[in-house]
Amino acid sequence: NAGVTQTPKFQVLKTGQSMTLQCAQDMNHEYMSWYRQDPGMGLRLIHYSVGAGITDQGEVPNGYNVSRSTTEDFPLRLLSAAPSQTSVYFCASSYSDPLRLRGEQYFGPGTRLTVT
Amino acid sequence: GIQVEQSPPDLILQEGANSTLRCNFSDSVNNLQWFHQNPWGQLINLFYIPSGTKQNGRLSATTVATERYSLLYISSSQTTDSGVYFCAANTGNQFYFGTGTSLTVIP
């Protein structure tokens, strides 16, 4: 049971380049989400998914796309990287129950992205 | 979304001291979690505590949902407790994080 895994651990991009951050979980969690963490701040929600085929926007979705074709995977795409997207990105997953209450979240190790 | 405020923002303790960290939230929430971010950046689950009190070793947490706050108690602090402590509150499908309490425990 690997939990939540993220790749890569580090990435440097030039402005305008695109890339995909990978996230996978092996706990059969319905709910998955992406956050960014900037210095001195808490985590802010980018996008989330309540199940395969269903995604929605969080607090800071601009510049990012997501898709959820399987329960296990939830990739985050940067279409045209900007210096403002320099941050640490965390993926998380949890169960969701029929009452729509979200269970305990489990986080991946993070991806440190620098855009020059 | 809801506002989540944590206090104090910074805390320095002598090893062995006790401390209380506070998390206030602006509206009713479905659940509340506490995390520790260690110096390597890893987020570690401490408590999933929508209400009531839980204890795990030297750590305990209490959430009073009707008064919209949660407390994290650290007793007999150790240098390995250093890092940033975050609370996160959930409403609907979204989690909202506070800006954290940065704890430094000195030997």
Image (spheres, coloured by chain):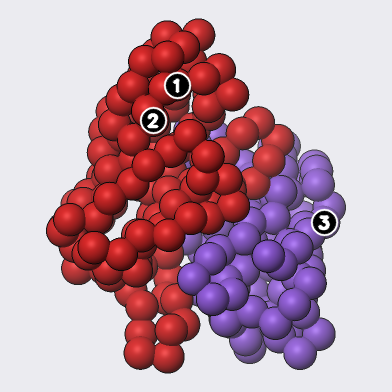
Chain colours: A red, B purple
Q: Nearer the viewer, mark 3 or mark 2?
A: 2
Chain that bears disc 1: A
Kindly identify the residue that appears in the image at 68 percent across and 41 percent down: A41
Residue at x 77%, y 57% (from the top left corner): B6
Q: Where is the N terminus of chain A found, in terms of image quarters?
A: bottom left
Q: Which residue is mark 3?
A: B7
Q: Nearer the viewer, mark 3 or mark 1?
A: 1
Q: Which mark is residue A106?
A: none
Q: Residues within 10 Å of mark 2 (few under 14, many from 20)?
A: some
Please say if the residues under marks 2 and 1 sit with CB atoms less than 8 Å apart: yes
* Location of residue B72 by image quarter: bottom right
Q: What residue would you read off at disc 1?
A: A81
* Viewer can see residue A62: yes
Residues at marks 2 and 1, CA–CA distance in whole angstroms: 6 Å
Residue at image mark 2? A78
- Callout 3 amino acid: Ser
- Local secondary structure at mark 2: strand
Residue sitting at x 43%, y 84%: A100
The answer to which of A95 and B107 lies nearer the viewer is A95
**Parent chain of label 3:** B
Say whether residue B47 is visible: no
The residue that appears at 76% across and 90% down in the rendered structure is B66
In this picture, residue B11 sits left or right of residue A37: right
The picture places residue A109, in percent across and down from the top left corner, at: 37, 41
Mark 1: give few (<14), some (14-19) or many (20+) Cα within 10 Å. Answer: many
Query: How far across and down, in percent of the image, does residue B12 sit?
Result: 80, 42
B44 vs A42, left or right, is left
